[in-house]
Image: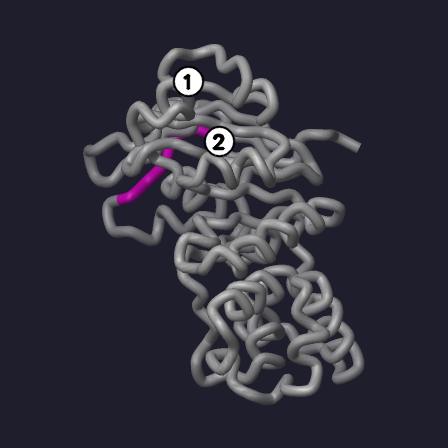
Amino acid sequence: MNKTILKTENLCAYFTDEKVLKDVNIQFERNKVTAIMGPSGCGKTTLIRTINRMHELVPGARITGRIILEEDNIATLHPILVRRRIGMVFQRPNPFPTMSIFENVIAGYKLNGIHLPKDEMNQTVEEALKGAALWDEVKDVLHRKGTFLSGGQQQRLCIARALAMRPPVILLDEPTSALDPKATSSIEELIVELKDTVTILIVTHNTAQAARVSDFTAFMYLGELIEFGTTQKMFTVPDHKKTEEYLTGKFG
């Protein structure tokens, strides 16, 4: 099986005439965690939004170059099919407020018009909640609103919602920035466990978090990919002075 599950080729992204990603070439390995780091405005979030075709939802936004998922150029696929295969979890926990915990997990199927038999639906919800390390905490309250949970539980519910579609790739956009240290720690443990079954890209400002959870790290600056490699190497002997300055807190 090909170790590379996802790659970008000469990827550029624009907001009208402003070029915000500049010829990004990067390969993401299957069943690994890759951290995407860099100062605010460097293109981290734009990069992952191009990968699940959310960037193009912004008026005037476009990309050039190619994004290949497994063997498919994602530009040739329907965006809904892309998002079934590439899950996304945002910065702030966002369970659907009118839905129960159960309904939140299965929401992707409902929104895509996919009907599951009741037994399969129950099994999918249980597996996704177990995958997000939330099942034991919520199995007796599945029909309460998702918003009744704590912030950390809500974020794990959003991860369960992404996992329920069984995507090969999940994008996490600063998933712990709105959480307290205890909830952050539980999400970090979860990320490390999940890579057995899914490939994870995590945007993070937190260099210590990147060091704890990721196998590979990409460092971006002003829309360019400055350096990419194993996290261990980048955090000990980075190739570029700009990477070293960022990691040692000279700017951020």
Q: Counting other residues with Cα less than 10 Å from the Cα at mark 1, is it few (<14), some (14-19), or many (20 or more)?
A: some
Residue 217 screen position, x and y as percent: 53, 29
Q: Quadrant of residue 219?
A: top left
Q: Give the camera-side residue of 52 and 133.
A: 133
Count residues near mark 2 (Cα–Cα under 10 Å), then give few for <14, some for 14-19, many for 20+.
Answer: some
Q: Nearer the viewer, residue 87 or 57?
A: 87
What residue is at 56 percent from the left and 88 percent from the top?
144
Type of amino acid at the residue the image marks with label 2: Arg
Q: Which mark is residue 66?
A: 2
Mark 2, mark 1: which one is toward the viewer? 1
Q: Which mark is residue 244?
A: 1
- Dividing the picture into quarters, in which one does residue 232 lie? top right
Of residues 217 and 151, which is closer to you in this image?
Answer: 151
Q: CA distance from mark 2 to mark 1?
A: 30 Å
Amino acid type, label 1: Glu
Q: Is residue 240 magenta?
A: no
Q: Residue at x 52, y 26 (%)?
A: 26
The region drawn magenta spans 61-66
Q: Position of residue 25 (x, y in %)?
A: 49, 23
